[in-house]
Image (tube, helix red, strand yellow):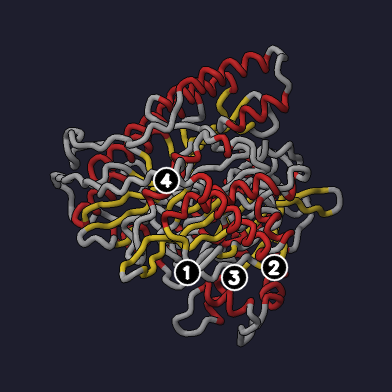
Amino acid sequence: MSKTSLSQSKPDNLPKPKINWAKVEEAERFAEMVKLFRQGKINRDDFRRFRLQNGAYGSRMTDDYSMIRIKIPAGEVYPEQLEKIAELSESFSIGNAHVSTRQNFQLHWVALEDVSEVMRGLSEVGLTSREACGNSIRNVMCSPLAGICPDEIFDPTPYAIATARFLLRNPMNQSLPRKFKINFTCCEKHGMARIADIGLIPYKVEVNGKLQNGFKIFLGGGLGAQSFVAHQLEEFTPEEDLLYTIISVVRVYDRMGNRENMARNRMRYLVNEIGWEKFQNIVLKERAVVRATQSVVIKLEVDKTPEVLRKVSISSELPSHPQGFSRWIKSNVMKQKQPGYSVAFLTLESGDVTANQLRVIADLARDFSAEGRIRNGFAQDIVFRWVRDEDLPKLYAGLLEVGLANPGSLTMASVIGCSGTTSCNLALTNSHRLAKEVQRKFLELKLDEDDDLRSSTIKISGCPNSCGQHEIATIGFYGGGGRLGKDMYPLYTMQLGGRADEKAMLGLTCMKVPAKRVMPTILKIVEIFKSEKRDGETLDSWVHRVIDGNGGPNVKSLNDIKESLKSAVVAPTIDQDKDFYVDYGNDGSYHARTGRGECAA
């Protein structure tokens, strides 16, 4: 990247990572275990459990390659860490990294014998993959807008970091019935507290004339083959009870979770099967025991030291508004609650970012972010915070040079897609590539500039397990297979009306849509919406009105939408349209072959 328009040297006041999450001896241990596995001294299942506990997934249909998931607590990543991930992706992966919907970085197709080398490299910059997979508490998430959101009551980031630090390598976290997810968010709008095992939203109440920090805590949510919206534990949980509550929930799940049936052993199934009131009472009683027996020895070490912001000074020889800047700033930038600063979102395609782009992002974070780092977001995106308003044109110009200045990040044009058949054993379709195709088409049509579509979302999963979060999308899809005669073709089930805010609900199944008809189906829905909408109505609000049976004049219900789309999803014969039977990103004929899932150890 050309630096003629930016500062000529790296700032000397860069913050360093506060926490070293790594243990280099884990890399040595992994290398030794690989040798024993190759020698036949460890059976496949035992090695698989060990591998997953250390953050290495098996890649599609092979034990010889892994996907390494790098744990990024609260999504915070420093420039030197970005550069190390870039280096490792070039040396051991496929030259790019992937940002997940849970704020992690992932490196795909790493040879099994090289996993320990990646782990060793990560440890050099304080990063780890430990417990990023397996039957453990996964990456502790925190909204990328935490600390800068105009609607937040207080910044939950220090609590998220402290929680992650307490739980990492904790004995209580090593052999749960299944994976477990914790999600802190800044406010009701910017997070997914109601679809996590534990979701937390900052809250305050007045106690003895003083406002006291605490949380609204939600339990038992989650997405998958069967999904549930979480329940609120109590009206208010004071901050001194935060850790005791988390410990209590984990202990109850560990003790009562179903270890016999892998398909039903997430905590949401336990809550559903025994009933919310019973589960709630068990957790509250457990918390009383934890508070009474462990309050002296266990504390959550929350670092509330105020953020020290750097003075960022950039020389400027750029025009004030580079080409495309106004479109980008409308759809990718939000004002912070702090006057004079903005937050900018990078539109990635299905979360993919190249090694070179990571290095440029590291440099741009040094140059433009007053906090000197970036955060991974909740939507497969990367977020620059604390950017001075006057520096936004220069930041945009830097992104433009490396293909990262696409608009649409905060609109329906930013499409989420899980990895699908590019790497996942369970995937039935290439959701990863389809999401890219839809995003490109939306940007080509400039639908990111349509305010009626801005608040809506499109999310695509390669199977029913919802890694692409299709059940909380305005328009969601999950992959499967269809058949006409003896010929199979890639197919998606479409759901409408999902959302994850304070009115959280799961999308309702509408119809099955062949993969090669997904694009025209979405555009047809937009066309119907435009002809049916009321003044000031957005696509997502219209969808919910129709779902409630209050549509009109022509489309009154979900069945009417289905009827309007019926002709668009008819399957041609293979002689009429051979491409119809080929999935996106593939050359050969479609098949629905899958392997063993890697979501549980």
- The residue at which mark 2 appears reads as 510
Label 1 is placed on what type of residue? Leu
Give whichever of 116, 252 is nearer the camera: 252
Query: Residue 370, can we see it?
Result: yes
Local SS, label 1? loop
Contact flag, marks 1 and 3 (Cβ < 8 Å): no
Which of discs 2 and 3 lies nearer the camera? The answer is 2
Local secondary structure at mark 3? helix
2 and 4 marks in contact (CB < 8 Å): no
Foreground mark, 4 or 1, reads 4
Q: Tag 1 or tag 2, which sits nearer the N-term?
A: 1
For marks 4 and 3, the one nearer the N-term is 4
Dot placed on the residue nearer the N-terminal end, 2 or 4: 4
Residue type indicated by callout 2: Cys
| Spatial CA span between label 2 and label 4 | 45 Å
- The answer to whether any part of residue 436 appears in the image is no
